[in-house]
Amino acid sequence: MVKWRPWCLLLFGCLALGCGGAAQSRLPDLRQQAVKLNDEGYQYYRESKWRLAQNKFTESLKVNRLIDHRPGIAANLNNLGAIAQEQGNLAEAERLYREALAIQREIGDPDGVGEALNNLGSVYAGLGRWAEAENLYAEALPYVRTPRSGPLLALTLTHQGDAARHHRDYPRALALYNEALAIDTARKNRAGQAVRWGRLGRTYLALADYAAARRYFLMALEESRRQEMTGGIIDALDGLMNLALALNDRSEAQIYGERLVSLYQARGQSREADKVTELLKAGQPRQPRPGGN
C-alpha cells in the first residue's frame, strides 16, 4: 500500500496562464487534489472501508491521468491493487500491479520497481505460483539494495523468507527474517519489527518450538496494536490461535479465535470469520495465508 511518495507532494510552479498578477484567481492545483484524494483513500483503507477507499483511489487516478502525472498514476494503481488483493480478487490485483510496474520501469524509479515486483510476487504466492513469486523477489533485490531503501529491502527479504518457509527450509527462512529484522531495528521501524516477529513466530511454530513461537506472536500482537496495524493484529491472533490448537489447548484457542472472528466481522469479512469458526469446531491448526505471518 502506497500512502504517497514525497515527490507526489511537490507543487507546480506558475502555470502558463494565470501568473501575471494578484488580480487573477489561482486555479486549483490538480496534483495536490490527487494527493488529497489518495490520502483520504488511504485512511479509508486503514479503516477497512474497502469501497470508500477504492472510490477515492479511483478519483485520484482520474485526476492524475488528466495531467499525465506518471508517478501518481503508478501509486494509485498500486493502491487499487492492494484493495483488490484484500478482497481476494487476485486476477484484478495482478492486472493493476503489472500496469503500475510498467510505469515504474518507464520513469526509472528503483524503489517503485522494487515495490511493484514485491506486490506482484505476493499475488503469485497467493495463487500458489511460488516459482514465479520467487523469481520476482529475486528480481526486486537489486532495486532495493540502496541506502534509502531499507523498508523495501526488509520487505523483499521477508517475502523470500516466506518462500523458504513454504518449502520448509526453516533455517533459511529464519536467516532471512532475522536479516530483515536487523534492518528494522537499525532504523527503529517498530511496525516493521512487528511484521518480522510474526513471521518468526510462524516459523518457530512450524518447528514445534512453542515457547519461542508464543514469545514472538505476543510481541507482534502488542506492537501491532500499538501501531494500529489491523493486518498485523489478525496475523498475530491467527498465530496464537493455531499455537493453542497445536498444544491442544481448546480453551485458549477459543479465546484468540473469538477475538479474530470479531475483528473479521468488524472488517466485513464474513467469509474469513466463518473459516475461523469452522476451524475452532474442527480443532485443527490451519495453514497460514501465503503473505501472512
Image (tube, rainbow, N blue to C red):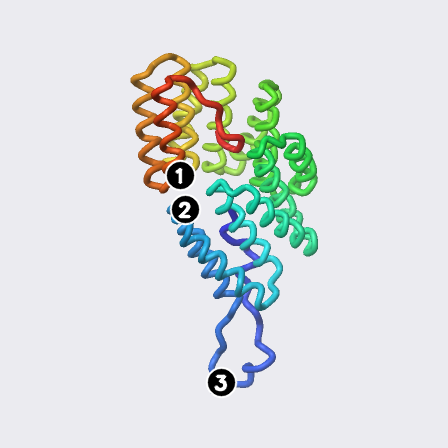
How packed mark 1 is, by other alpha carbons closer than 10 Å (few <14, some 14-19, many 20 or more), is some
Horizontal side of 283 relative to 32 (left or right) equals left
Kind of residue indicated by mark 2? Arg
* Residues at marks 2 and 1, CA–CA distance in whole angstroms: 8 Å
Residue depicted at 60% across the width and 40% down the height: 118
Secondary structure type for disc 2: helix
Count every numbered label the image shows and give the total.
3
Of residues 74 and 90, the one drawn nearer to the viewer in this rendering: 90
Horizontal side of 241 relative to 26 (left or right) equals left
Kind of residue indicated by mark 3? Gln
Q: Mark yes or no: residue 206 visible.
A: yes
Of residues 103 and 129, the one drawn nearer to the viewer in this rendering: 129
- Disc number at residue 276? none
Residue depicted at 60% across the width and 36% down the height: 124
**Disc 2 vs disc 1: Cβ atoms closer than 8 Å?**
yes
Whole-percent x, y for residue 187 in the image: 53, 38
Disc 1 marks which residue?
Answer: 230
Disc 3 marks which residue?
Answer: 24
**Disc 3 vs disc 1: Cβ atoms closer than 8 Å?**
no
In the rendered image, which quarter is residue 238 located in?
A: top left
Residue 219 vertical placement versus 146 (above, below):
above
Disc 2 marks which residue?
Answer: 46
How packed mark 3 is, by other alpha carbons closer than 10 Å (few <14, some 14-19, many 20 or more), is few
Horizontal side of 247 relative to 293 (left or right) equals left
Whole-percent x, y for residue 33 in the image: 48, 65
